[in-house]
Amino acid sequence: MKVQVCIIGGGPSGLLLSQLLHLQGIDTVVLEKQSRDYVLGRIRAGVIEQGFARLMHEAGCGERMDREGEIHEGFHIAHGGILDRVDLSKYSGGNSVLVYGQTEVTRDLYDARDRMKGAVVHQAEDVALFDLTSDAPYVTYRDGGRTVRVDCDYVVGADGFHGVSRGSIPKGALREYEKVFPFGWLGVLSRTKPVSPELIYTRHARGFALCSLRSQVLSRYYIQVPLTDKVEDWSDDAFWAELKHRLPAEASDRLLTGPSIEKSIAPLRSYVVEPMRHGNLFLVGDAAHIFPPTGARGLNTAASDVHYLYHAMVAHYRKGDGSGLDCYSQKALTRVWKAQRFSWWMTTLLHRFSEDTPYDDKLKETELAYLFSSEAALRVLAENYVGLPY
Ligand code: RFL
Ligand code: PHB
């Protein structure tokens, strides 16, 4: 097989890039290790920046998102038993976020790829990358008993944190930055009316909690748990009791519970690799960086990587201008680090760390009291939450 761009990973990053490039006449193939059902079964992001939504429109995938996604002009932070609201619209100059699940984003992208007869190979086994620093890189994978070779101009590693692309770069050519948080999020999806029409992020002595949603009939809740906890340790009843405990009374009194339809634990990690390019391999999304989910940055930062790389590739193929490709890594990383800063701030502020002293608690309480007494501080929060411009 010969294509211009071989994309590894059929998550949102890989599918969105392939859809955008295809619309510009640039030929791609997507190699995905898992089945389509498996990819669509992963419950992840829920909050989407308008920048990402614009990119979905550019990719011709915005119609259902416009119809079914919910515009959120604010969210709440519960602390010290009270509920404070962040007016995103007021403090970000009229901006907002969209509540639309990653599952739905991925489904829309798959449907668009199908409509355009885009090449997406599922269950591509043993994907391997070769000659990345030459002008003729290639990728191989196994399809049942046969090995398929894909020759290309560029390889894009969009295969998430545990993918094969980043690992194909010699260790000495990369610098890694990592912070592993000593806790995870236990998430529950339930077919119940959300406790609040807007998200509630909660700081509590027993640990963080988040009330989120996918629609007004589908709720997504999370609680901070020790890394040693297993999903089997948490019955639905135990989950609801702990969530109620952490929410302020005005929310817990209204909480509607029901059977969980999905329950999983995600560890919290921050990670960045530099640079995001090696020869003719470009890394995008979780393959290059991971965020703790507290600030809702992961998928949104994957989208800004896709935006930069897409425009750089179009300039290269259309006008022979390679400057965008040359500064892709630096441009993407500038925004990645600002998003890391924001998610670190929000995660540290709202979670309970075992080493927190009464001094730390006082500082965090004061940080929150200051936040809700200062328009300047609320502006900083709002402009980061809706997403910095790109
Ligand atoms: P993905 O989604 O991990 O997709 C990578 C794909 O690559 C495939 N793959 C391979 N394919 C071929 N060969 C190999 N060797 C391969 N190895 C892996 C995988 O099967 C997979 O299909 O990465 P991508 O596309 O970069 O997308 C990133 C997002 O998934 C991620 O950043 C977000 O989910 C993070 N995140 C959130 N981000 C937001 O912007 N807003 C949110 O509200 C938000 N909430 C969340 C989140 C992540 C969470 N978890 C579970 C970590 C909430 C949670 C709980
Ligand atoms: C979600 O709905 O899954 C979600 C929302 C906001 C976050 C993280 C996850 O910050």
Image (tube, helix red, strand yellow):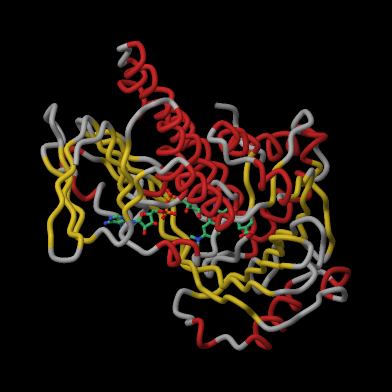
- 46 or 243, which lies in front? 46
Of the pair 81 and 56, the residue shown nearer to us? 56
Which quadrant of the figure contains the C terminus? top right
Q: Residue at x 74, y 39 (%)?
A: 96
Name above or below for residue 41 compared with residue 72. below
- In the image, residue 354 sits, relative to residue 362, either above or below, namely below
Note whether residue 348 is visible: no
Position of residue 171 in the picture relative to residue 115 (left or right): left
Name the residue located 42 percent from the left edge and 37 percent from the top edge: 17
- Compared to 149, does 186 lie above or below? below
Image point (43%, 45%), residue name = 15
Q: Which residue is at 77% across, 51% downward?
A: 75
Residue 288 image offset from top left, x and y in percent? 36, 44
- Percent of width and height locating residue 307: 47, 31
**Foreground of the two, 242 or 299:** 299
**Quadrant into which the N terminus falls:** top left
Left or right: 336, with 272 as reference point: right
Q: Quadrant of ligand 2?
A: bottom right
Q: Quadrant of residue 185?
A: bottom right
Q: How many marks?
A: 0
Residue 45's spot in the image, x, y percent? 57, 55
Image spot of residue 22 (x, y percent): 41, 33
State whether residue 247 appears in this view: yes
Q: Nearer the viewer, residue 283 or 310?
A: 310
